[in-house]
Image (spheres, helix red, strand yellow):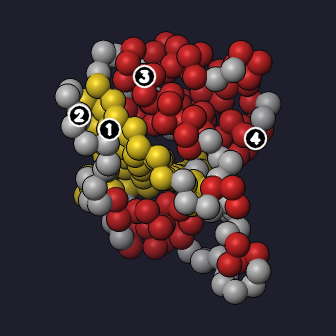
Amino acid sequence: MTNILIVGVGGQGTLLASRVLGAIAAIEGKDCKLSEVHGMSQRGGSVVTHVRIGDNIAAPLVTPGEADFILAFEKLEALRWGYYLRKDGKLLVNDQEIMPMPVITGAMAYPDGIYAKLAEEGRDTVVVDGLKLAAEAGNTKAVNVVMIGALCAIEGVKYEVALEAVRRSVPAKLLAVNEKALVAGYKSVGK
């Protein structure tokens, strides 16, 4: 079984990312359960999606300390949800800062040294410049597909399978951009 937690803020496409992972599981003939926790998604708040892939999955939620992978579409979300990662799990982080409301209003400061804190916690972290790669693919909103590509490369998912899952999950008018984003994600981790 593979447990994946996708974390980000509203508008980053965590739900689409979970649908792509679900399509990958279906193509590979595996069971998949998804569970979405929205939070304050309309206001840029935290959004979390649980994805469990394997045989005969009973429960949709990943429990703390059990995630094989965390896909973090924003740096602070990586720090916030890192405790879900198991000891030998991998944290993939989009190297982007999106200021939460308490930072915007001046009530709090955006934390410094997030990667150092993740290292102190013993998190095996892979940083991807997803925003830059998505922009190069043609749309900054394709960060989610860049990160899916990076995860698939690390997990050994064949590119053709991931591409078919993207084709099943995104509107036709956005397919060309998302195909480029998927390739960029695969290449970002050198696999």
Instruction: State the residue in front, 114 or 101.
Output: 101
Q: How crowded is mark 4: few (under 14 residues within 10 Å), some or many (20 or more)?
A: some
In percent of width and height, residue 99 lies at 70, 68
The residue type indicated by label 2 comes to Ile
Please indicate whether residue 87 sits to the left or right of residue 149 in the image: left
Residue where numbered disc 2 is placed: 57
Badge 4 marks a residue whose secondary structure is helix
Residue where numbered disc 3 is placed: 24
For the residues bearing labels 2 and 3, Cβ distance under 8 angstroms: no
**Alpha carbon separation for disc pair 4 and 2:** 34 Å
The residue type indicated by label 3 comes to Ile
Of marks 4 and 2, the one in the foreground: 2
Residue where numbered disc 1 is placed: 52
With respect to residue 146, does 127 lie above or below? below
The residue type indicated by label 1 comes to Arg
Which disc number belongs to residue 120?
Answer: none
With respect to residue 55, does 120 lie above or below? below
With respect to residue 31, does 77 lie above or below? below
**Alpha carbon separation for disc pair 3 and 1:** 12 Å
Residue 56 visible, this angle? yes
In percent of width and height, residue 85 lies at 33, 56
The residue type indicated by label 4 comes to Thr
Please indicate whether residue 131 sits to the left or right of residue 2 in the image: right
Upstream in sequence: badge 3 or badge 1: 3
In percent of width and height, residue 25 lies at 37, 23
Which disc number belongs to residue 140?
Answer: 4
Badge 3 marks a residue whose secondary structure is helix
